[in-house]
Image (tube, rainbow, N blue to C red):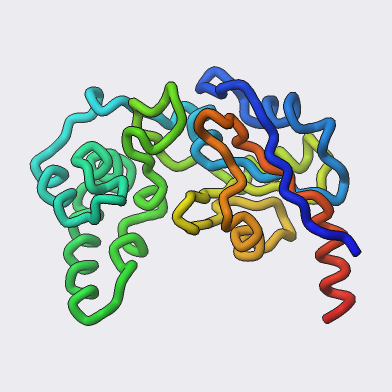
């Protein structure tokens, strides 16, 4: 019986001077087979795309300083810099109205409305210290075109599929982009224990071995 195996791949520190697909090919290709899925951490994809900024380069408005106080401390938007970066990507007034409606929704017991209305990049901003050195002094935005990145990885490596994933140690797992034919929710469940290591481990790539065989067997047994 084919069993899934998660294989983290160690790299050097990747920067905005690198191409993420080139780096995956360099460090992972020899371990990747035609039945495997290659997944990569979204923050590293974003860094290689240059989607980073330093707090001192942001012009923080009064509204950002006010609204950040209503975000729980574990969230990246709880700092005025994180909130301002969200406003810069999704629009100041969109964030404001989403916050107001989100607060009203919470009164009636409905959560998550703010992030549903505020735009996709809002939930993806990593505040200072939210990512690996030397970028722990920067804010990192969400990656551009994660589906396109996944398709390019699949094409270059000849694997069964590829994915760009946003996973953390709090059991929060989301797959932002996949190559055609993959189920992002299924991959998110597989990656829920966060096999990525974006700090000193330097393992932003994880190969899901035997994915195609395991999927075929599951369908045959259904």
Quadrant (top left/top right/bottom left/bottom right) for the C terminus: bottom right
Q: Hey, which quadrant is residue 217 in on the image?
A: bottom right
Q: Vertically, is 149 above or below 95?
A: above
Task: Look at 52% across and 22% down and name the residue there.
Answer: 15
Can you give x and y, in whole percent of width and height, for residue 38 in the image?
72, 44
Residue shown at 36% from the left, 64% from the top: 116
Viewer-side residue, 168 vs 175: 168
Name the residue located 18 percent from the left edge and 77 percent from the top edge: 107
| 14 versus 210 height, above or below | above
The x and y percentages for residue 4 are 78, 56
Query: Which of the 4 quarters of the picture holds residue 134?
Result: top left
* Location of the N terminus (image quadrant): bottom right
Left or right of 20: which side holds 6? right
48 relative to 147, above or below? above
Q: Looking at this rendering, what residue extends furthest in the top direction?
A: 17
- Using residue 12 as the reference point, say whether residue 32 is left or right of it: right
Horizontal side, residue 51 vs residue 185: left or right: left
Residue 50, position in %: x, y? 46, 27
Image position, residue 145 (x, y; %): 55, 43
205 sits left or right of 29 in the view: left
Would you identify the image quadrant in which residue 30 lies? top right
Tag count: 0
Q: Residue at x 41, y 26 (%)?
A: 135
């Amino acid at each position: 019986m084919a069993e899934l195996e998660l294989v983290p791949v160690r790299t050097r520190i990747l920067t905005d001077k690198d191409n993420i697909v080139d780096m995956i090919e360099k460090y992972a290709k020899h371990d990747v087979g035609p039945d495997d899925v290659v997944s990569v951490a979204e923050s590293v994809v974003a860094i290689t795309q240059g989607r980073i900024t330093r707090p001192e380069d942001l012009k923080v408005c009064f509204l950002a300083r006010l609204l950040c106080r209503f975000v729980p401390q574990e969230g990246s938007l709880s700092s005025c810099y994180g909130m301002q970066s969200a406003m810069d990507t999704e629009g100041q007034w969109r964030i404001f109205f989403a916050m107001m409606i989100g607060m009203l929704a919470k009164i009636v017991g409905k959560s998550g409305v703010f992030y549903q209305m505020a735009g996709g990049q809002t939930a993806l901003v990593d505040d200072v210290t939210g990512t690996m050195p030397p970028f722990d002094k920067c804010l990192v935005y969400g990656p551009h075109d994660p589906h396109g990145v996944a398709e390019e990885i699949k094409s270059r490596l000849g694997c069964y599929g590829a994915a760009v994933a946003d996973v953390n140690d709090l059991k929060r797992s989301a797959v932002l982009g996949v190559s055609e034919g993959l189920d992002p929710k299924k991959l998110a469940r597989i990656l829920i224990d966060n096999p990525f290591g974006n700090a000193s481990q330097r393992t932003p790539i994880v190969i899901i071995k035997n994915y195609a065989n395991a999927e075929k067997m599951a369908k045959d047994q259904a």
